[in-house]
Amino acid sequence: MRSLIGSDTQLNQKSYYEASVQREPLCPPLQGAVVADVVVVGGGFAGLSAALELAQKGMKVVLLEADRVGAGASGRNGGQAIVGYASGQGPFESQLGAADSKRAWDYSVEAIDLIEQRIALHGIACDWQRGYTYVADSARKAKALREEFDDHCARGVACDWAEGTEVARFIESPRYVAAFREHTSGHLHPLKYALGLARAAQAAGVQIHERSPVIGLDRGRTLVARTAQGQVTARYGVLA
């Protein structure tokens, strides 16, 4: 437990991503009482995306972030945007059936397209590039990788296969015996993307307050999100 607590407290240390951006000035903490259509709690990808979409639909949105926008997992992850799911499609097909499994897969592809569309629409400079390489370092793993390659191709994902010396086309390492590169997934600088979403949300009218942790939620005919120095009363809330 001590080690977990210790590692959690290190989150206030600068990550590579944090050290490689120039942040905007702090969005002022919430002061006093504010009324909105929607209050969004959390300034990561989910909260910023929800706030942006709602504001674009004409709603008055207030977003409350406990620290800085993108300070948590959204601004500290590996930056990969990959089609499909970590479990593979097997559990989806066995539990949901073929049609809904395909729908879930399609959602993952649409999500990557949406990222690219937002980057282009809002001019977000986040080092986005398409492409992802899967590798195998043994013959046994290469067989499983080939099955994954065939599955991707069957689902309509453009992929290129390589083995032996041809692997060098994708990665300069003698360690790998087979690889395939697919062209739908991609990679970005996650914190730059989060900060770009924040700017887009503000341009759409979203009111962002950083260093404003929510300490209470009162639910009645309206929702009241309370911070140490203020509160937001809203018809709807998004906990992100």
Image (cartoon, rainbow, N blue to C red):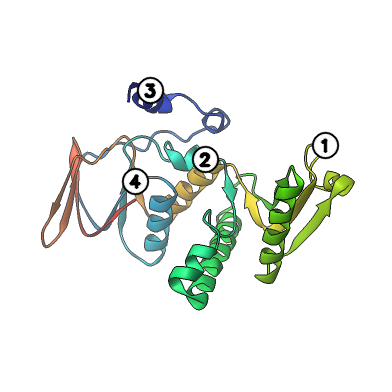
Q: Residue furthest right?
A: 165
Q: Which residue is mark 3?
A: 3
In space, the residues marked 1 and 3 are separated at their CA atoms by 37 Å
Q: Residue at x 48, y 52 (%)?
A: 200
Where residue 195 appears, x then y in whole percent? 49, 43
Q: Quadrant of the N terminus?
A: top left
Q: Residues within 10 Å of mark 3 (few under 14, many from 20)?
A: few
Give the mark nearest the N terminus, 4 or 1. Answer: 4
Q: Residue furthest front?
A: 140
Position of residue 239 relative to residue 78, above or below, is: below
Q: Nearer the viewer, residue 65 or 164?
A: 164
Residue 240 marker: none
Q: Residue at x 74, y 51 (%)?
A: 142
Where residue 61 appears, x then y in whole percent? 31, 56
Q: Which residue is mark 4?
A: 42
Residue 174 marker: 1
Q: Residue furthest left?
A: 220
Res. 140 visible in picture:
yes
In space, the residues marked 4 and 2 are separated at their CA atoms by 16 Å
Q: Which residue is mark 2?
A: 77
Asked whether disc 3 touches disc 4, contact meaning CB atoms under 8 Å apart, the reply is no
Task: Give the residue type that dot 2 points to.
Answer: Asn
Give the mark nearest the N terminus, 4 or 2. Answer: 4
In space, the residues marked 3 and 2 are separated at their CA atoms by 20 Å
